Image: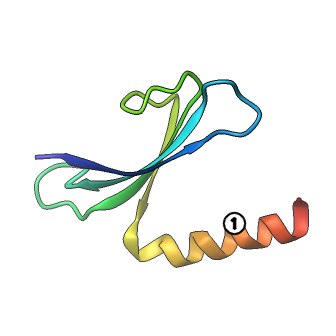
Amino acid sequence: MKKTKLLKTIPLAHTKEGIITISHIEEPYGEGSKPVVSIGISLNGEEHNPDWKAHIPYENINDVIEALKEAKEKLS
């Protein structure tokens, strides 16, 4: 059974009500599936109904963090 735990809410820059949510999801794809971190973007501030979301397996988090750091250094 899919269980979600909200870990952090971050205000979304350049919006009035937008938020970024970071959540932990157990068994996101059914019984026996491995947990993921979910990153949600909500333009209207709804924590439980994001407009966009990405599920990242824990095994990929370090690579995603490095890619985000590179993007920030090179493009911001």
Q: Which residue is mark 1?
A: 68
Residue type at mark 1? Leu
Crowding around mark 1 (Cα neighbors within 10 Å: few <14, some 14 to 19, many 20+) is few
Provide residue 66's location: percent of width, then percent of height. 66, 76
User: Residue shown at 49%/71% (left/top)?
Assistant: 61
User: Residue shown at 25%/50% (left/top)?
Assistant: 28
User: Residue shown at 72%/39% (left/top)?
Assistant: 13
Horizontal side, residue 76 vs residue 35: left or right? right
Q: Is residue 33 above or below residue 13?
A: below
Please identify the quadrant where the C terminus is shown: bottom right
Provide residue 32's location: percent of width, then percent of height. 12, 61
Q: Nearer the viewer, residue 11 or 27?
A: 11
Horizontal side, residue 3 vs residue 69: left or right? left
Residue farthest to the right, as pictured: 75
> What secondary structure is found at the residue carrying circle 1?
helix
How many marks the image carries: the answer is 1
Q: Is residue 62 above or below residue 41?
A: below
User: Residue shown at 61%/25% (left/top)?
Assistant: 17
Horizontal side, residue 23 vs residue 62: left or right? left
Place residue 16 in its image quadrant: top right
